[in-house]
Amino acid sequence: MSPSANIGLLAGTAGGVRFEPQAMPAAPGPDGLTVRMLFAPVNPADLLAIDGGYAFALAADDPLGAEGVGVVEQAGSRVSDLGPGDLVLPLDRGNWTRYRAVARDRVLAVPPGVDPRQAAMMRINPATAWLLLAASGAVPGDCLVQNAAGSAVAHWVRRLAALRDVAVIDVVRPGASAPGLADDEHLEAAVKAASGGRRVRAALDCVAGDATGRMAACLDAEGTVLVFGHLSGEPSTIRSQLLTGRGLTVRGFSLRPAEARMTPLARDAMVAGLWAAAGQGAVELPIRAVLPLAEAERAIALARTPGRGRVLLDLDAISGM
């Protein structure tokens, strides 16, 4: 395939993927950008989209890819703050492709000096952690509990909560090597002991299924359970006595609708806060493998297996296509 060709990776049938030629972007309009994509992680949301289990409808003829990083190749006449060579994060889906046409207001500028591979993982997880903390209602001196403690979102929750004097209790699968409390029948008592007397204000549940009920049982009265993931693949279950006896609230959370409710001022403050945290070392997340776009099926299969770190697609590498 010619280096100047465009290609996208789309969801196929029966949980597969397919490559489709994409039109090369036309010259950008006054407020637009032409972006050559560099790296994109295989995100859990991408796996759900491939399997047909994503919470929102996705166009069948649009490329996959919840997040990624690209480099500006051409900027419109009214774009004064970005130019060729600048790194950007597209805000919208469709990043598993070689070239994108995007509006200036639908990208975030990447500060100088950030590793593009690390920048590729900055769109989803940091903002999710930021807004989960905001939705949790936790204030300085409170405590929250989170499962899937080895995930990138959990990493960011710990980092951002520490800046707000909110304690975080991590929960892991029974038998897991990662540090944290085992997600078993003893979890409620273990969390109570670990809280050290702090109010357990919220539970961040990325697993669903029976885990939702065990997380809810850890909360103090008037606490909140935020369900934002589906790792178990099972419906959330919770004892009704917890809802009535403790007055708990159970809510769903998804990043893009939460962002859509933000004012531009609030979004700018979030982005500034996240880049500031990244500059303090929070951005160094583990990478398990970097594979060319031509080996996307291998990358997806690897991302489905347990392991530490994200699998990245190198969107600029087209060998074998």
Image (cartoon, grey):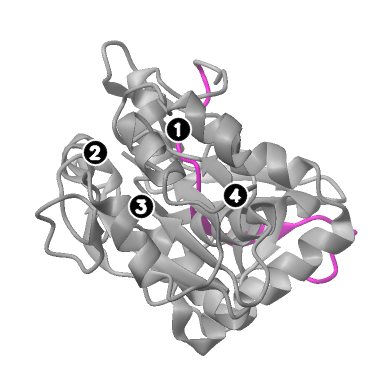
Distance from label 1 to label 4 (Cα)? 41 Å
> In this view of the protein, can residue 121 be seen by the observer?
no
Q: Nearer the viewer, mark 3 or mark 1?
A: 3
- Residue count near mark 3 (Cα–Cα under 10 Å), binned few <14, some 14–19, many ≥20: many
Q: Which mark is residue 281?
A: none
Q: Is residue 267 above or below residue 206?
A: below
From the image, tell me which residue sits under label 3.
147
Q: Check contact, mark 2 vs mark 3: CB within 8 A.
A: no
Is 254 placed left or right of 49 in the picture? right
Distance from label 3 to label 1 (Cα)? 27 Å
Q: Which mark is residue 64?
A: 1
Q: Which residues are magenta?
A: 61-82
User: What amino acid does circle 1 point to?
Assistant: Leu
From the image, tell me which residue sits under label 4.
221
> Residue at (30%, 24%) from the top-left corner?
17
Tell me residue 87's x, y (percent): 58, 68
Q: Is residue 71 above or below residue 283?
A: above
